[in-house]
Amino acid sequence: MSRRLRDLCRPHAKTARCRPGEIHLEGEAGKAIAVARRRLIVAGAVFMLAFGAIGYRLVDLGVIRAGAEAERAKLAANKTLPTDHRADIVDRNGIVLATSIRSWSIFADPALVDDPGRTARILAHIFPQQSVRTLESKLRRKSRFVWISRQASPAAYQQILRFGLAGIQARPDLRRVYPQRALVAHIVGSSDVDNKGIAGVEAKMDERIRTIGRPLRLSIDLRAQAAVREILARSIEYWRAIGGAAMVMDVRTGEIPAMVSLPDYDPYALLRVPKNARFNRNTLGVYELGSVFKILNTAMALDYGVTHLRKKYKVDKPLPAGRRFIRDLHPIARPIDTGAILVKSSNIGSATIAEQVGGKRQKKFLRRAGMLAKIPLELPEAGQPLYPRHWRPVNTLTISFGHGIAVTPLHLVAAVAGIVNDGVMVAPTLLRRLNGKPLWRRRLVSPKTSRILRVLMRRVVLEGTGKRANAKGYRVGGKTGTAEKAGRGGYRRKALLSSFVAAFPMNRPRYVLLVSLDEPKGNKKSHGYATAGWVAAPAAREIIERIAPILRIPRQAEEPEKSRKQFLASAASGARKKDRRSAASGGSRQ
């Protein structure tokens, strides 16, 4: 080490000599170097922070925001907004029943509007449903935000852009559209301006529609729906009824391919239509349906073993029921058997059979048939059945022929479907069952009881009150039901609810159909009658002839009458033998 350097160097206390990095200058030179070092460190830190900020900005623009812009472009291409997404609703064949399209919600900042009068006149021209006065009052408010129009069309938005109105702005939105309009209004329902379901499937399945990424496929077949609606509307007009309902159900899967309630409504004007048009008669209306209940009464008695086909009943005299009497529309002088009671629709015979069954077992059977509770379905419009709180003997008699208990048409269709489907009742549904299996199933009656009822229902159409429902080639079976509507002070004799429930083809039932007309009026052709055999049965026949090919039901030759009689004879013979065995053992089936 040189002498000059040695003179400038002052070693550490424990170091024998100066080493590189351990030089400590004394005086002004040392202070200057220390200051320079600190400034260099600060400058380096500043440059590092600056380059770090620039690097982050480059990553933000090149990677993060580029991904977000790509996602927004993808959403725009798909014409969906994440917060307003609603899946399409389609029929079983993929035809669109409800979908969402791009729209614009127009709003204003009154503080930025130059000329409220002129702006209001232009907006009234674009939105003719709003008056100039209303729009001008909105534009003169003290607030900074007012709605002009929700979910406006792209054409309306383009006009606003063309005029360049100061203070008028727009945001992208989604609008729900219903291409089929009133045809499926009671099923699909509608949604409000905030894209929230407020009726029908749109309301009941709102959460699922918002979250699924594929269309919601219903069981409805739009072709069958259109045919049923056309025929029902024509029948209502011809018989001057105030309304009507019709429904078709697959007895094996529970799927409903058609459900019509008239009058119906335009889903775009849900809040402006009359209440009776918004009312779904199939699922919400509860009615005393009359003699169609005799199907359940007969099946119940046969299944409990209380009666058999050859057992005779006297029906020539009115049957006391409390302070009143049960009568038949067409009195029968001779004793008739259990089958004839259903075929000829005898109120007296049905009440007598129900009396033998007893109120406790009758109530138990009806509960098993789903008649005493709401039926779960993918609609919020569901009616609660009305039945006696205290099940008195007189109630047992009247309920046997459909009076004193009020249910929805859906209740009756589901129960009759269970009776004809080898005795197995399945869950009704408005969703397509891709696997062909119902949501649930339970046994209602035995397979043998089911076979007997199918033959008897077929006889009703061939020999009884339902002759006008006989659709050639489809082996229709069914039952008529004419009920007087309740009013103040009792039943109104001329206010009828005329219904016909049918199943086809009866040798192997696949579908159940219910047609109901509310307060039809008789005419010359019907000799003044407005009963179900005259007004509802012909509509059922026409519907079956129209929809059977659509539902892929092949035409069949008429079954030989001899085979029906042989089956009934064998069933009656088996019942008599069973009765003799039961009597010998001292008991009967409960």
Image (spheres, rainbow, N blue to C red):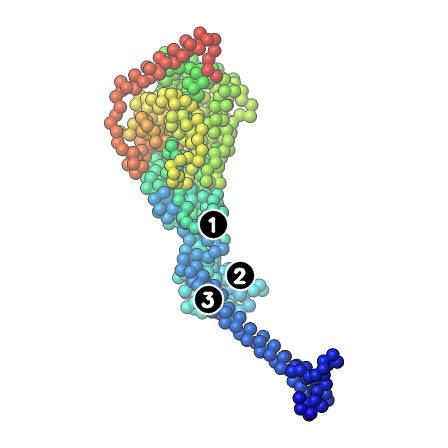
Q: Where is residue 243 in the image (x, y as percent from the top left)?
A: 40, 36
Q: Where is residue 588 in the image (x, y as percent from the top left)?
A: 46, 13
Query: Which is closer to the viewer, label 2 or label 1?
Result: 1
- Distance from disc 2 to disc 1, alpha carbons, whole Å, reads 31 Å
For numbered disc 3, what is the local secondary structure? Answer: helix
The vertical placement of 368 against 65, above or below, is above
Query: Which is closer to the viewer, label 3 or label 2?
Result: 3
Q: In which quarter of the image is residue 13?
A: bottom right
- Distance from disc 3 to disc 1, alpha carbons, whole Å, reads 26 Å
- Distance from disc 3 to disc 2, alpha carbons, whole Å, reads 34 Å
Instruction: Give the residue at mark 3.
Output: 66
Callout 1: few (<14), some (14-19), or many (20+) C-alpha neighbours within 10 Å? few
Instruction: Give the residue at mark 2.
Output: 146
The vertical placement of 577 against 421, above or below, is above
Name the residue rendered at 32%, 18% in the picture: 567
For numbered disc 2, what is the local secondary structure? Answer: strand
Circle 1: residue type? Thr
Callout 3: few (<14), some (14-19), or many (20+) C-alpha neighbours within 10 Å? few
Query: Which is closer to the viewer, label 3 or label 1?
Result: 3
The vertical placement of 466 against 107, above or below, is above
Could you say which is closer to the camera, residue 92 or residue 244? 92
Q: In which quarter of the image is residue 186?
A: top left
Instruction: Give the residue at mark 1.
Output: 211
Q: In which quarter of the image is residue 312?
A: top left
For numbered disc 1, what is the local secondary structure? Answer: helix
